[in-house]
Amino acid sequence: MSMIERLQPPRGLRVLITAGASGIGAAITRAFLETGAKVLICDIDPAALSAFAEAHPDVMTLKADVSDEKEVDALLDAAAQQLGGLDVLVNNAGIAGPTGAIDEIPLEEIRRTIDVDLMGQFLVLRRAAALLRESDAGVIINISSVAGRLGYALRTPYSAAKWGIVGLTASLAKEMGPDGIRVNAILPGVVRGPRIEGVIRDRAEASGVSYAAMEAQYLANISLRRMVEPEDVAGTALFLCSPAGANISGQAISVCGNVENI
């Protein structure tokens, strides 16, 4: 096998991507479809699912909230039936959560962030594990964040959940390694798109500065002085599923332009 071939995932992989209809999830979905993978995506937004499916007729879709155990059960049942098994799980679903001081954030917003961003990954993993063990080369990619390696003032629920994903990944890599399953986390930085625009707007308001000033502050904390594109994260996901990534497991891989502070 040539090095170019080693850098490409095998064709025909059976892939499940949560929150795969927009943002980073959509970029990852498009990337796997380009490799000839069979892809099932879920999303909480039916309109986004419909629009993505119209643009990409080969994708399979299902509306699901990953924080809802029954909906996750239905999602994994669909994966078993529609994909015929599972080779790759991309645990991408997450929400930005609230911005504010710890003693001012409503408790229900803290719980919702943890339920979606961290507990949602547990719910999917506990049902996906058996399917992945039946694969010849199972791969799990958990999407965390640069907030999973750095403290993040005024964003404590989100950061706590993303740190939890890194611990989950390292532990699960040890647990499932003997089954031949590789488990890694990708930690995106400041990814261009509507979500980070909302985060910057809310943090600017909480800090009493303009949007432009807060955006400049974010960029100044990145060594490369630029935002990450969703396709950068997608490319890393493909690499982790390729033969070239066959001995990478238990890692938290930042795709962030070297964020030094957030």
Image (cartoon, rainbow, N blue to C red):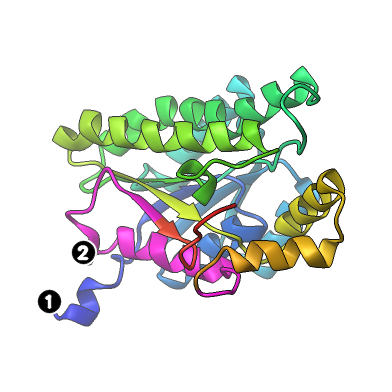
**In this image, 245 relative to 104: left or right?**
left
The residue beneath circle 1 is 1
Counting from the top left corner in percent of width and height, residue 26 is at: 60, 60
> Who's the residue at 66% across and 33% down the image?
65
- Image coordinates of residue 54 in percent, x first then y, are 71, 65
Q: Residue at 53% across / 70% down in the picture?
A: 231
User: Residue at (42%, 57%) from the top-left corner?
Assistant: 254
Taking the view exactly as shown, the residue that stands out farthest to the front is 208
**Alpha-carbon span between mark 2 and mark 1:** 10 Å
Disc number at residue 171? Answer: none
Q: What amino acid type is highlighted by mark number 2?
A: Pro
Could you tell whether 256 is left or right of 46 in the image? left
Q: Is residue 219 magenta?
A: no
The secondary element bearing badge 2 is classed as helix
Q: What are the residue bounds of the magenta stretch?
A: 224-253
Give me the residue at 81% from left, 25% from top. 104
Whole-percent x, y for residue 178 in the image: 14, 34
Q: Are marks 2 and 1 in contact (CB under 8 Å)?
A: yes
Q: Which residue is mark 2?
A: 243
